[in-house]
Image (cartoon, rainbow, N blue to C red):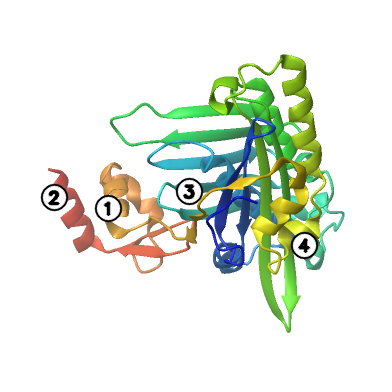
Amino acid sequence: MASSEDPHASDDDQALPFQLDALGVRGRLVRLGPSLDAVIERHGYPLAVARPLAEAMVLCAALATSLKYDGIFTLQISGDGPIRLLVTDLTTDGALRGYAQFDSWKLAVALGAGQDKTLLGGDAPEGYVPKLFGRGRLAFTVDQGQHTQRYQGVVPLEGATLADCAHTYFRQSEQLPTGIKIEARRTSDGGTHHWRAAALMVQQMPEFDAGRIDVDREQREDDWRKAVILMASATEKEMLDPGLPGTTLLHRLFYEDGARAFPRRPFVARCRCSRERIDRVLRSIKREELDDLRDSTGRVAVKCEFCSTEYAYDDRDLDRIYASAA
């Protein structure tokens, strides 16, 4: 494999871009580890919620790093099932976060547990999207700041898995043919739980970019099918094994076609919330409408959904916020 990277470098929380010049295909291998632990274990989600969130976070990272943007890429899934909302986003400097909202009762029923919530720790069932999300939509948003136009792609939530739903998006959009494979798993070691997730993504390049203008359409289609078949042959163990370098995995999968690797893109679990941001949000709300947010001490309490940090405001704090808005 052609690469200037250390083949034994850790793949945790990084995207490894690559290109198959012989097939006119580009791609990336994304692996998440500690960042998932930081996000998921903080909330204590049941496994049937945590696994879709882990898959969504690695999908978000794979899609975001395939685009050229300067800002925030957001993946959002909303539905009428047990998991009402799932949101994850990634900034261009690698800050990754995510959270889920779900109904415990509906989740128990969906998993066949009735009223026994002790079974909520079960893994997400096969074909989990219809069962856990119900009818809904999948949205991708690229926000590059207040002076630029925000891009959003929205499709119905169709498919058995999140990878299937992503394929639906690419089929319905004007994007290039894209294949995605996602794996996620929680492991236990001496009572300690750890999450790992991986996404392998391939995308057909435009003929001009790939330098294959003279290659006929039938050959391009054959090359594309070959790339997808090779991608799909990766096993769950290979994709999630922390002891298997990403460059080695790519070499195994695309040995005949010479995968060319590029510098890795690192990620870190980091929330962007701050008191200044919450100040701006509260300032946009009429003061009398904040009474519903007051806790037992009379303070206005605002909790960040992503990191669970709580920001409390007494009347003096509110005086300061609204005085600055005058």
Residue type indicated by callout 3 = Leu
Counting residues from the N terminus, which is met first, the one under dot 4 or under dot 2? 4
Q: Are marks 4 and 2 in contact (CB under 8 Å)?
A: no
Of callouts 1 and 3, the N-terminal one: 3
Query: Please, what secondary structure does the residue beneath circle 1 have?
Result: helix
Q: Which mark is residue 323?
A: 2
Quadrant housing residue 163:
top right
Marks 4 and 2, how far apart in space?
Answer: 47 Å
Instruction: Tell me: 89 left or right of 158.
Output: left
Of the two numbered discs 4 and 3 on the same chain, state the one appearing first in sequence. 3
Question: Mark number for residue 138?
Answer: none
**As drawn, which residue projects farthest toward the right?**
112
Q: Looking at numbered disc 4 in the image, what kind of residue is underneath it?
A: Leu
Q: Amino acid at mark 1?
A: Asp
Q: Residues within 10 Å of mark 1 (few under 14, many from 20)?
A: some
Residue 198 placement (x, y as % from top left): 67, 54
Q: Is residue 85 left or right of residue 70?
A: right
- x, y percent for residue 149: 37, 26
Q: Residue at x 26, y 64 (%)?
A: 314
| Alpha carbon separation for disc pair 2 and 1 | 12 Å
Which residue was labeled with disc 3? 90
Q: Which residue is mark 4?
A: 120
Say if mark 2 contacts mark 3, CB within 8 Å: no
Q: Is residue 299 visible?
A: no
Disc number at residue 279?
A: 1
